[in-house]
Amino acid sequence: MSTPPASHAPADHADDRQGANGVHRALQIIFAVAEAEGPDMGVSELARSLNLSKTVVHRVVRTLVDDGFFQMDERTRRYRLGPAAVSVGLSALARMEVPEIVRPHLEALVDHSSETATFSVRYGDKRMYLSQVLSPQEIRMAVPLGKLFPLHIGGSSRAILAGMAPEELDRHLERALPGEGNAPERARIADEAAAVRARGFTVSAGERQADAGSVAAPVFDARGQVYGSLSVCGPLNRVRDERALALGPVVVEAARAVSAGLGFRAPA
């Protein structure tokens, strides 16, 4: 009687798990360096931040250097992103179609709210409506695509302000509302931005357009900078008070999904 061939399945599965764990550790290390406050990191610093052994980190970073994802400073023995990482990032950006990323989330907001959903992008000290999905209701809001608006008026604009770092917001307000006479207004907007930042969304009632209400949340890009904002807007009698507050978390969740589609990784 012939002996059946030995099965290699358990060993294969073990190899698969080991390979997946290795990929996961490599990605952890790449993201740690990419998201570090400084331009580079050392092995000890990486090991502490990721709760990995220095031996494991050193083995992974040497492989990443060999593959061009990291560069090592021979003097400091610290690592920074290399040309292969830059190439992958640029390739992803070149293939990114922002309207296609955003549209499913706008459609989902309209399905949920039966109001118009919009997406605005920041252009320096102003912002522009890039896309919208209209409400199915007979009386509805529609926004002018391609027109520039200031960043200190309207819910979509103020959501972008709330996404700025406080020091960047202060510089913007000094440019947009210069002079001592505007100091109280700058302080008011900065305080409101801090409150919106904590809550996650802003509510506007007849601020940019009479009889219009909106709920908006900031959208961030892969660099962690505010890219624009997502909003639900409609007649003020339908988008205000309790209903506006109830829509807030839904808009925030959609904005987070768009941000993730643009490459943003929220801090742990």
Image (spheres, rainbow, N blue to C red):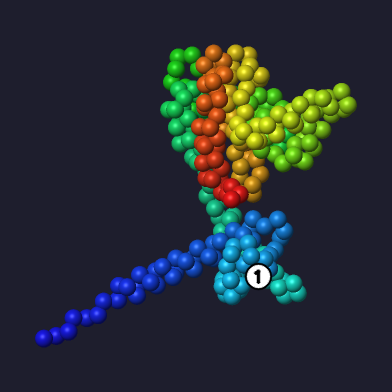
Task: Give the amino acid at mark 1.
Answer: Val
- Residue lying farthest to the right in this orientation: 180
Measuring from the top left, give residue 38's x and y in whole percent.
72, 58
Quarter location, residue 79? bottom right
The residue depicted at 79 percent of the width and 29 percent of the height is: 187
Viewer-proximal residue among 146 and 2: 2
The quarter of the picture where the N terminus appears is bottom left
Left or right relative to 121: residue 136: left
The residue depicted at 44 percent of the width and 70 percent of the height is: 18
Measuring from the top left, give residue 93's x and y in whole percent.
57, 50
- Residue lying farthest to the left in this orientation: 1
Measuring from the top left, give residue 224's x and y in whole percent.
64, 47
> Is the residue 139 above or below the residue 147 in the image?
above
Residue assigned mark 1: 43
Residue 120 in sight here: no
The residue depicted at 18 percent of the width and 81 percent of the height is: 4
Crowd class of label 1 (few under 14; some 14 to 19; many from 20; radius 10 Å): many
Viewer-proximal residue among 8 and 95: 8
> Is the residue 27 above or below the residue 124 in the image?
below
Residue 216 in sight here: yes
The residue depicted at 25 percent of the width and 80 percent of the height is: 6
- SS under mark 1: helix
> Is the residue 195 above or below the residue 81 in the image?
above
Measuring from the top left, give residue 83's x and y in whole percent.
63, 64
